[in-house]
Image (spheres, rainbow, N blue to C red):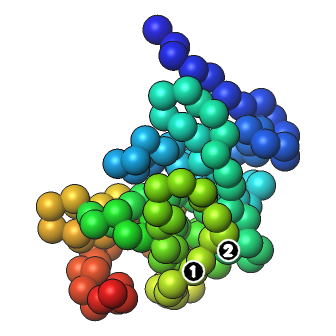
Amino acid sequence: MVLWLTGTNGTGIGQFKIPHSVTVDPFGRVWVADRDNKRIQVFDKVTGEWLGSWSSCFSEDGPYSVRFTANYKYLIVAQLNINRLAILAAPPVGSIGDCFMVSTVQLADETKPHLVDVDMKSGAVYVAEIGAQQVQKYIPLSWFPTT
């Protein structure tokens, strides 16, 4: 049974060009990596209402995969074409606001990070790389801000 459905092909609010990854935060928001529109769109998980979008952090390459860190303070975003992981500050409950890039992890040339997942117990970040044909595990303490 479908509870809500959003999206058609396009660039407008609630439209997508290759929706590529989805994650949910503990505040009832659904975050969708809208890859070819170079943005993340956010929806209410109960109603499907559009809550906002972020595009300012993705001028160079769209988001391929998006996941929250174990403490839900940051989002990890894989950017395949520039071989990078972006660490974005998660907004508090309420307004989605503007995208704020806290840090980046530049990966080796041609690794092509495609999917990201986070172990919610240990905080470890796993990255599937289609160029390098490998999976890497990162321990977040070495590259997340401590505040």
Mark 1 lies on residue: 101
Mark 2 lies on residue: 57
Q: Residue at x 50, y 86 (%)?
A: 103
Q: Residue at x 33, y 87 (%)?
A: 147
Residue 28 visible to the viewer: yes
Whole-number angstrom distance, CA of label 2 to CA of label 1: 7 Å
Residue 9 position (above or below residue 56): above
Q: Quadrant of residue 40?
A: bottom right
User: Looking at the image, which is closer to me, 82 or 57?
Assistant: 57
Judged from this view, the residue extending furthest toward the top is 1
Dots 2 and 1: beta carbons under 8 Å?
yes
Q: Residue at x 50, y 65 (%)?
A: 91
Judged from this view, the residue extending furthest toward the left is 121
- Say what amino acid the circle numbered 1 marks: Met
Residue 144 position (above or below residue 31): below
Q: Residue at x 56, y 85 (%)?
A: 109
**Horizontal side, residue 125 vs residue 5: left or right:** left
Q: Quadrant of residue 119?
A: bottom left
The residue carrying pointer 1 sits among few (fewer than 14), some (14 to 19) or many (20 or more) residues within 10 Å by Cα, namely: some
**Horizontal side, residue 121 vs residue 9: left or right:** left
- Say what amino acid the circle numbered 2 marks: Cys
Secondary structure under tag 2 reads: loop
- Location of residue 80 in the rendering, given as x and y in whole percent from the top left corner: 59, 68
Residue 47 position (above or below residue 124): above
